[in-house]
Amino acid sequence: MYGAVKVDEEKCNGCKVCVFACPDPNVLTLLKTKKITVNQDRCKACGLCASVCPKEALTVN
Amino acid sequence: MSKDFLRISPAFEDIMPAEYRELVASGPYGKGYGISDLGSHKELLEEHPLCAGCGLALSLRLTLSVLPAPEDTVIVGSTGCSALAFPQVALHNIHSLFGNQNAVAAGLKRALKLRFPDKHKDVVVVAGDGATADIGLDMVMQSWFRGELITTIMLDNEAYANTGGQESGMSPKGAVLNMAPKGKKFQKINMPELAREAGCVYVAAVSPANPKRLGKAIRRAILVAREVGPTYVQIFAPCPTNFKFKPQETIKRIKEREKDGTYLTREYISQEAQEYLAAMEGGNKDE
Ligand SMILES: Cc1ncc(C[n+]2csc(CCOP(=O)(O)OP(=O)(O)O)c2C)c(N)n1
Ligand code: SF4
Ligand code: SF4
Ligand code: SF4
Ligand SMILES: [Mg+2]
């Protein structure tokens, strides 16, 4: 139904700023590798995470 | 309270929903988590039907992630958009008749004090601006006059969002909404000032554009309400659907309003609350 956000792992530094900007729970998770992962099924593609990411590591499809 | 009450009987493990099993395995009960722990554990809020980019959903999510003792917290809600999320919240919560939330919370707090005299049971009202500053204002103010030991949190989206966009007392002057096409004629109510004058010993106006500050305010408000007096936190939670801006602009909108001085972040702490917090906060990581 919705699009979803994609993470560019090369750019992500694991700062979690995106995690604190997402209105939906348990969508963005920090992996052990210190990279962000997205639960695509639950992402509503609002783009708030991308609007705050300092590394421009997130894009909305 | 220990985490034991959550544990699943082994015979039922395979039929419990995955979300419940995840909560037992990695939920926040008894852990004392804060904002910085988000993204690393199962949250109390589950998938919800609020709109994409909803500032209210973000504020609620952040609020629930900093409760000092989720297992000993009861949330009292009211009608409005947040009510649509509460069936998905893994906490004790009560849906009260629209506007009655502070009266229900005050009675509940007193009853819990009688039932559990040696324990802190945090009673936290979470309601919209219409419920708090308009239709429930009587109950809100009277609970503050009486010094009830409860926390009142307003999710301020500056409108009656759930009913399609009427102006509320908290809409800014000039606001145009679906059902307020001529623009609002009077000023936004200054609720933080009213709260202070009415007897709240801790008052804060915050926004999800600064999640750590929001978290700190919620935590302080709940701790202070345990012993010192009533507390109030107002969270600016813009609504893209009714104010017709793009969902990715919610945080940008908050920053613009903070910059032009039409939504001020502020905090008031009474002398007694300051002393109480100073004793509580020594060495606590998220404070
Ligand atoms: C006693 C009563 N009066 C009116 C309503 C209709 N009603 C439902 S939600 C709502 C507006 C809620 O506005 P607000 O508290 O700001 O919450 P929001 O939806 O904006 O989050 C109203 C008037 C109702 N449900 N019950
Ligand atoms: S905000 Fe950007 S850089 Fe930071 S964790 Fe999220 S995706 Fe990675
Ligand atoms: S696009 Fe919106 S819903 Fe999806 S991860 Fe980003 S903030 Fe969350
Ligand atoms: S109408 Fe507004 S406040 Fe209600 S869920 Fe949608 S964006 Fe959020
Ligand atoms: Mg509202």
Image (spheres, coloured by chain):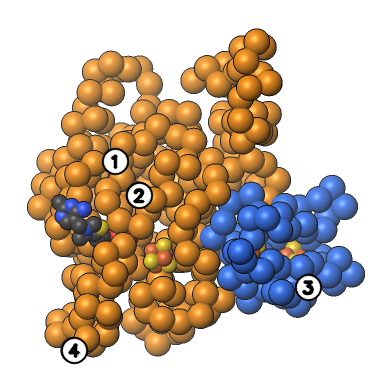
Chain colours: A blue, B orange
Where does label 2 land, which residue?
Answer: B83
Q: Amino acid at mark 3?
A: Ala
Residue drawn at the location 27% of the way across and 51% of the way down: B79
C-alpha separation, residue under disc 1 versus residue under disc 4? 33 Å
Question: Looking at the image, can residue A16 be seen?
Answer: yes
Q: Determine if the C-beta at disc 3 is less than 8 A from ligand 2.
A: yes
Q: Determine if the C-beta at disc 2 is less than 8 A from ligand 1.
A: yes
Looking at marks 1 and 4 on the same chain, the residue that comes earlier in the sequence is marked by 1
Residue drawn at the location 61% of the way across and 24% of the way down: B16
Where does label 3 land, which residue?
Answer: A57
C-alpha separation, residue under disc 4 versus residue under disc 2? 29 Å
C-alpha separation, residue under disc 1 versus residue under disc 2? 7 Å
Where does label 1 land, which residue?
Answer: B95
| Residue B75, position as x, y percentages in the image | 35, 39
Looking at marks 4 and 2 on the same chain, the residue that comes earlier in the sequence is marked by 2
Crowding at label 4, few (<14), some or many (≥20) Cα neighbours within 10 Å?
A: few
Q: Chain of mark 2?
A: B
Secondary structure at numbered mark 1: strand
Secondary structure at numbered mark 4: loop
C-alpha separation, residue under disc 4 versus residue under disc 3? 42 Å
Looking at marks 1 and 2 on the same chain, the residue that comes earlier in the sequence is marked by 2
Q: Chain of mark 4?
A: B
Q: Amino acid at mark 1?
A: His
Question: Which of the two residues, B48 or B136, is positioned nearer the viewer here?
Answer: B48
